Amino acid sequence: MDSVTLDPVDLRLLHALQIDGRAAFSRIADVLGVSDRTVARRFGRLRARGSVRVAGVTGSRHTGHAEWLVHLRVLPSGAAALTRALTRRPDTAWVTVTSSGTGIVCVFRVPGEGPAPLDALGRLPQVTHADAQRLLNPVMDRRWSGRTSALTEEETAALRPAAPTETEAFRLTDLDRRLLPALAVDGRAACPDLARLAGWSESAVRRRLDELRRSGVLRFDVEVDPGLFGCSAHCLLRLSVAPARLGEVARALSGDREAAFVATTTGPHNLMAVAVCQDAGALHTYLMDRIGALPGVAHVETAMITSYAKRAAPVPMDR
């Protein structure tokens, strides 16, 4: 990625995309008080430099998948090749390198209630240890605050799409199976382009896209490196919390400005989180003064995130 510095317009644009990743440039421009051309040019520049990516993401419960958080301890000499291989797998939804290349943490999405592929992973020569915990429930209902602090409440409300009406019984169609992969690659793909890729009419694509969004099956994730917001310390936390306090601690963490993700899991560590802090000193303070003071937290394991290889969307094949 080229060196990028975000100015106030960039920050406001990124916040707007976090609210609605498919919002028309004209709508964003009205809220930001700039021209359509400025918004399009800024987005194109950031996208071309690999600083931002909008991806359509489907919730695993709508597609009948279980999510497993897999931790691998690896030989540093083999970490890069294994990371690349994991990012290419269609069953990985999140791949990160931790502890300067001695660990890889990834989320596997497997059909039904199937197991994580630990047997195959454990046989790899570069893997020295593998374990898996089932991701039970994401607790946070907001984005990391570092990405969403550039707009006012009024501006945010002007961009916010209608709240989805989620339903458990939602049947994916043949069109969905063509449409969703295309949106995963480019969440802002134009409807005429999506229609050509899917082999359906543009009107059918527009209608189905609206249905997928209204039902909560489809949401749009904006991939942005937190380092662009001046935050260099990214840390994976695995907490062991007393069951009676689990909900209380999860809700407390999900409200922290440092929290980027919080979810309950199975295993001896029943809560995991990703913390994003300005630097190592700020992370130390967060761990000591905040995490250490939460009632019910018996044990915490931490691992610095060295790099994000894959977030939610497929990795482009030219990488």
Image (cartoon, rainbow, N blue to C red):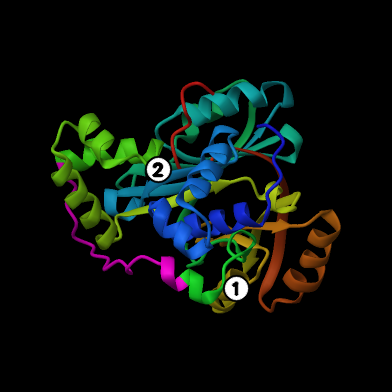
Q: Start and end of the magenta stretch? A: 157-173
Count of marks placed on residues: 2
Tell me the number on the disc at residue 255.
1
User: Quarter of the image containing the C terminus?
Assistant: top right
User: Quarter of the image containing the N terminus?
Assistant: top right
Is residue 131 shown to the viewer in this render?
no
Tell me the number on the disc at residue 109.
2
In the depicted structure, whether residue 68 falls above or below residue 267: above
Depth check, mark 2 against mark 1: the one in front is 1
Rate crowding at label 2 as few (under 14), some (14 to 19) or many (20 or more) other CA atoms within 10 Å: many
Q: Is residue 156 magenta?
A: no
Residue 314, picture quadrant: top left
Q: Is most of the magenta stretch helix, strand or loop?
A: loop
Q: Amino acid at mark 1?
A: Gly
In the rendered structure, which disc, 2 or 1, sits on the residue that comes first in sequence? 2
In the depicted structure, whether residue 152 falls above or below residue 268: below
Q: Is residue 163 magenta?
A: yes
Dot 2 lies on which element?
strand
In the image, 48 versus 215, the foreground residue is 48
